[in-house]
Image (cartoon, rainbow, N blue to C red):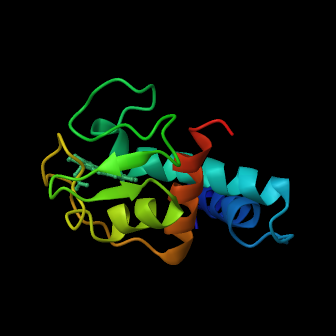
Amino acid sequence: MSHLSLLHLCLLLWTSLVFGCGPSADSSPGKNAALVSRGRSLHTTYACDSCHSLDGSPRSGPSYVGNFGDSVALVDGRKLVRDEAYLRRALVDPNAEIPAGSDASMPTYRLSADQLDALVAFMKSLTAD
Ligand code: HEC
């Protein structure tokens, strides 16, 4: 094994220790911060920010900055609340609930339960309490 791949292996081990299987204290502030930062990097990895800006500026997808808990009007006339369940459904089945002013252009992702938790925590963190 070359020195380079050994280095890669070490890096891989280190990241899985830091981000993967560290001891987790349930619902501690630290755990939420870790979830939020994982969600932030997933948001970049999946290029969600190509359609959803993180500064509230308009792109093809709606902003989720500062509107957690607000009501949202859908193209089919329904009114829902932007809560955790709504954000989760928006990721699992994006075209089931289309906000007014948007079209059905969001792709469907295959996300694990952990990835969903992280993305939802991240989106929620963009609205101050
Ligand atoms: C190609 C552009 C595009 C990409 C990439 C994209 N989205 Fe979307 N997204 C949209 C559009 C358009 C809507 C509105 C229509 C809909 O709900 O399907 C939307 C809706 C949403 C909503 C509901 C927001 C609201 O206020 O109603 C959430 C949450 C969301 N996207 C999160 C994500 C996340 C997280 C990713 C990355 C894993 C992502 N999107 C990737 C275009 C995109």
Q: Quadrant of residue 2?
A: bottom right
Q: Is residue 14 above or below residue 126?
A: below
Residue at (52% x, 58% y) in the render: 120
Q: Where the C terminus falls, by quadrant?
A: top right
Residue drawn at (53%, 49%), measured in percent from left and top? 69
Locate residue 79 relative to residue 117 in the image: left or right: left
Residue 1 or residue 47, whichever sits in front: 47
Horizontal side of residue 11 vs 87, given as left or right: right
Q: Locate residue 43, reporting x and y percent.
A: 44, 48
To which quarter of the image does residue 29 belong? bottom right
Residue 21 is at least partly visible in this image:
yes
The quadrant the N terminus occupies is bottom right
Residue positioned 82% across, 54% down in the render = 30
Above or below, 55 against 110 in this view is above
Q: Where's residue 100, x and y in %?
A: 20, 45
| Residue 47 is at least partly visible in this image | no
* Residue at (63, 64) in percent of width and height: 9
Q: Is residue 22 left or right of residue 52?
A: right
Percent across and percent down for residue 60 are: 20, 37
Q: Position of residue 57 (x, y in %)?
A: 35, 23
